[in-house]
């Protein structure tokens, strides 16, 4: 439910953010095309527009989001410097501020009073409106980023953010434009247009990714999986998975799902620039998929009349749920047993143990059960 306009408009205007968004947008839709028609853009301007747009997007997704906000892996200082520099260029606040707001968003998702960009307050609010006014929910809570406050690199960027943002957004495009012989062309494309496009692509994660798409893992919140949004946001569109498993470095779980951020993080491991990549156990993912299926089936059965074929489906689903509960219980028992055996050093390595083989059997059983539940869901209508 959207918040009434009177209540939403009570907060004071954030003039710095509002002017920045208005001015850059006006220049992007007026001056940029005018200059292109009257003067034309050199190829170098388009090349640098593309390179900076990609660098800004990856700095936000791989750096601000998956590294700093969720600690899904560890990065070499060289890579962290790149994230902090191009993250400042993306003009979305310091990594410390960004991570603080995002961790609060995960903690209080969909709470209109505490979620900084709550989707239940409407598309405009979650997309950009939350930054145009100084809402109490948008005030940074640094108590949730104590770990980042101990990182000298993060704190340097935070304390010198204005310098970093201005030098990368003005100095860098102007310098490259001068060296390439097209000062204003590079500045307008790689500076202004790049910033506007980068902003709204990122903002789609807070708005569209909470309003449009599927919810295969959980429907307890508004987050959704959407391949179109993923295409625009370097893989962040698989948002339902992310909100269910926020500490996994991946968003696109399947190999065919578009997630260049995942591929970049994984490939950097080969060069020693990333390590300790966190992945949710496959069994837990299958368990979430099935649990969500059962909840939906229960809701459909509860709202359906007690016809004979519905009673048959109800019995089938009850059997499936009993099998599901038994599998989960056995998995938990085997997991506990493995932990105990590891502590006593009485078994071989995990990859070669008989327990691992049994767990793989259980995972395969859940996959088969998920397919059966899909068939039952189709019969429910």
Image: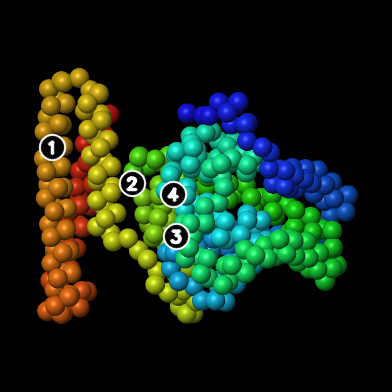
C-alpha separation, residue under disc 2 versus residue under disc 4? 16 Å
Q: Nearer the viewer, mark 3 or mark 1?
A: 3
C-alpha separation, residue under disc 1 versus residue under disc 2? 20 Å
Q: Are marks 2 and 4 in contact (CB under 8 Å)?
A: no
Q: Is residue 31 above or below residue 96?
A: above
> Can you identify the residue that label 4 sits on?
106
Would residue 307 be seen by someone viewing this image from the given angle? Answer: yes
Q: Is residue 299 left or right of residue 272?
A: left
Residue 217: which disc?
2
Name the residue at 13% across, 67% down.
Answer: 337
- Which SS class for mark 3? loop
Q: Position of residue 60 (x, y in %)?
A: 56, 59
- Quarter of the image with the C terminus is top left
Q: Is residue 115 above or below residue 355?
A: above
Q: Quadrant of residue 21?
A: top right
Name the residue at 14% across, 47% down.
Answer: 325
Name the residue at 79% across, 55% down.
Answer: 188
C-alpha separation, residue under disc 1 versus residue under disc 4? 33 Å
Name the residue at 46% across, 74% down.
Answer: 274
Q: Are marks 1 and 4 in contact (CB under 8 Å)?
A: no
Residue 70: which disc?
3
Name the residue nearer the viewer: 85 or 323.
Answer: 85
Q: Position of residue 67 (x, y in %)?
A: 48, 64
Of mark 2 and mark 4, the one earlier in the sequence is 4
Of mark 2 and mark 3, the one earlier in the sequence is 3
């Amino acid at each position: 439910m959207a918040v009434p306009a009177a209540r939403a408009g009570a907060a004071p205007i954030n003039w710095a953010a509002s002017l920045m968004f208005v001015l850059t947008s006006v220049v992007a839709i007026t001056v940029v095309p005018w200059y292109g028609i009257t003067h034309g853009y050199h190829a170098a301007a388009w090349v640098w527009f593309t390179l900076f747009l990609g660098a800004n997007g990856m700095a936000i997704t791989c750096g601000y989001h998956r590294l700093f906000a969720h600690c899904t892996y560890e990065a070499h200082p060289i890579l962290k410097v790149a994230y902090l520099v191009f993250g400042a260029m993306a003009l979305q606040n310091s990594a410390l501020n960004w991570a603080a707001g995002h961790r609060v968003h995960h903690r209080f998702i969909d709470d209109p009073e505490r979620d900084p960009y709550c989707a239940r307050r409407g598309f405009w609010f979650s997309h950009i409106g939350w930054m145009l006014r100084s809402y109490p929910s948008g005030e940074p809570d640094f108590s949730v980023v104590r770990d980042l406050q101990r990182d000298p690199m993060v704190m340097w960027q935070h304390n010198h953010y204005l310098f970093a943002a201005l030098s990368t957004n003005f100095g860098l495009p102007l310098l490259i434009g001068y060296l390439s012989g097209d000062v204003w062309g590079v500045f307008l494309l790689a500076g202004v247009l790049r910033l506007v496009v980068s902003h709204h692509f990122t903002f789609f994660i807070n708005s569209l990714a909470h309003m449009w798409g599927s919810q295969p893992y959980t429907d307890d919140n508004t987050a959704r999986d959407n391949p179109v949004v993923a295409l625009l946001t370097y893989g962040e569109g698989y948002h339902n998975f992310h909100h269910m498993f926020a500490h996994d470095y991946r968003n696109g779980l399947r190999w065919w799902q578009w997630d260049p951020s995942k591929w970049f993080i994984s490939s950097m491991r080969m060069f020693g620039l990333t390590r300790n990549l966190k992945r949710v156990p496959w069994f837990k993912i299958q368990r979430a998929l099935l649990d969500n299926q059962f909840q939906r089936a229960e809701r459909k059965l509860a709202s359906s009349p007690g016809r004979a074929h519905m009673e048959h489906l109800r019995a089938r689903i009850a059997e499936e749920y009993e099998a599901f509960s038994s599998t989960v219980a056995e998995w938990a028992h085997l997991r506990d047993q493995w932990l105990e055996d590891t502590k006593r050093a009485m078994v071989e390595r995990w990859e070669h143990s008989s327990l691992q083989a049994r767990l793989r059997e259980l995972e395969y059983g859940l996959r088969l059960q998920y397919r059966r539940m899909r068939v039952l869901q189709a019969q429910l209508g």
